[in-house]
Image: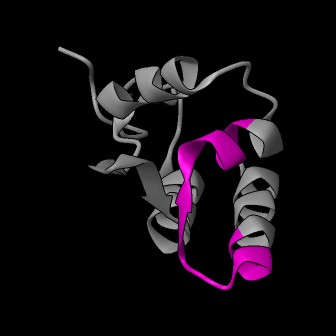
Amino acid sequence: MQGFADAVDRIAANNGRTDIELFQVCRALGEPNVPSLLSLKDEGLPVYRAGTWRIDCRSFRKWATAYTPYWPQTKPQTAYEGEPLF
């Protein structure tokens, strides 16, 4: 996801603005269209509507680097050494 955040930052740098239109992000991420990218809004993608759908590159970086699409497995709790189980 770090690479995606870098790609969005490059677009923002080329535009000279931190908020960019979502169709530009689609090109950078290889998504076919805006609605497919908007489906990530339920996962916390920070998009907003200002005439067209937009995203702030700083919010996207924060979301992309903190986003984990899976829950890590936790180790089962074990008894301490020398402590009986029952």
Decide whether residue 34 is among the magenta residues: no
Q: Is residue 26 above or below residue 7?
A: above
The residue sitting at the front extreme is: 51
Q: Nearer the viewer, residue 22 or 68?
A: 22
The residue sitting at the left extreme is: 86
Bounds of the magenta span? 12-26
- Kindly indicate the quadrant of the structure image that contains residue 9: bottom right
Q: Is residue 81 left or right of 50 when viewed as pictured?
A: right
Decide whether residue 19 is among the magenta residues: yes
- Kindly indicate the quadrant of the structure image that contains residue 2: bottom right
Residue 76 position in % (x across, y down): 41, 23
Q: Is residue 21 left or right of 71 when viewed as pictured?
A: right
Q: Residue at x 58, y 81 (%)?
A: 17
Q: Residue at x 51, y 73 (%)?
A: 58
Q: Is residue 31 above or below residue 57?
A: above
Q: Nearer the viewer, residue 18 or 42?
A: 18
- Kindly indicate the quadrant of the structure image that contains residue 40: top left
Q: Residue at x 57, y 52 (%)?
A: 64
Q: Is residue 58 above or below residue 24?
A: below
Residue 71 position in % (x across, y down): 46, 27
The residue sitting at the bottom extreme is: 16
Which image quarter holds the C terminus?
Answer: top left
Residue 11 position in % (x across, y down): 76, 66
